Amino acid sequence: MDKDRIKGKMDEVAGRAKRQVGEWTGDVETQGEGAAEEIKGTVQNAWGKVKDGARNLGKEHDDANRDIETDRKRDVA
């Protein structure tokens, strides 16, 4: 799991809590700060998922190439 996913999820949860506290207290500024932090966390989490997906795709590609090379060596032998 990418570190951006972890950090993003933490920011998302913290922002949601801050926004909720702002709603309970009627503090519009705190609500806005919390909402911004929540959005930032959501975006960072999504970016981490993209990086994980790219990393997994590269690994699958490498595994497929390794399998092809193994098959070629068997055919030659």
Image (spheres, rainbow, N blue to C red):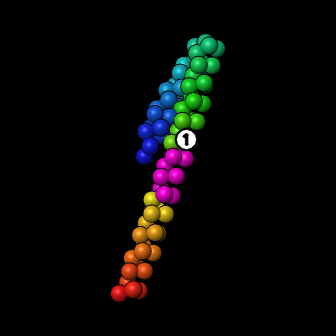
Residue closest to the far front: 76
User: How would you classify the magenta stretch by its main secondary structure?
Assistant: helix
Q: Magenta includes 50?
A: yes
Residue 24 in view (yes/no): no
What percent of the width, then of the height, locates residue 1?
Answer: 42, 46
- Amino acid under disc 1: Trp
What percent of the width, then of the height, locates residue 59?
Answer: 45, 59
For the record, the magenta segment spans 49-58
What percent of the width, then of the height, locates residue 41?
Answer: 54, 32
Residue pointed to by mark 1: 47
Apparent side of residue 73 relative to residue 43 in the rendered image (left or right): left
**In the depicted structure, whether residue 9 falls above or below residue 54:** above
Q: Secondary structure at mark 1?
A: helix
> Measuring 47% from the left and 52% from the top, which residue is drawn there?
55
> Measuring 53% from the left and 39% from the top, which residue is drawn there?
45
Front residue of 55 and 14? 55
**In the depicted structure, whether residue 31 falls above or below residue 72:** above
The 10 Å Cα crowd at callout 1, few under 14, some 14 to 19, many 20 or more, is: some
Front residue of 56 and 75? 75
**In the depicted structure, whether residue 40 falls above or below residue 55:** above
Q: Which quadrant holds the C terminus?
A: bottom left
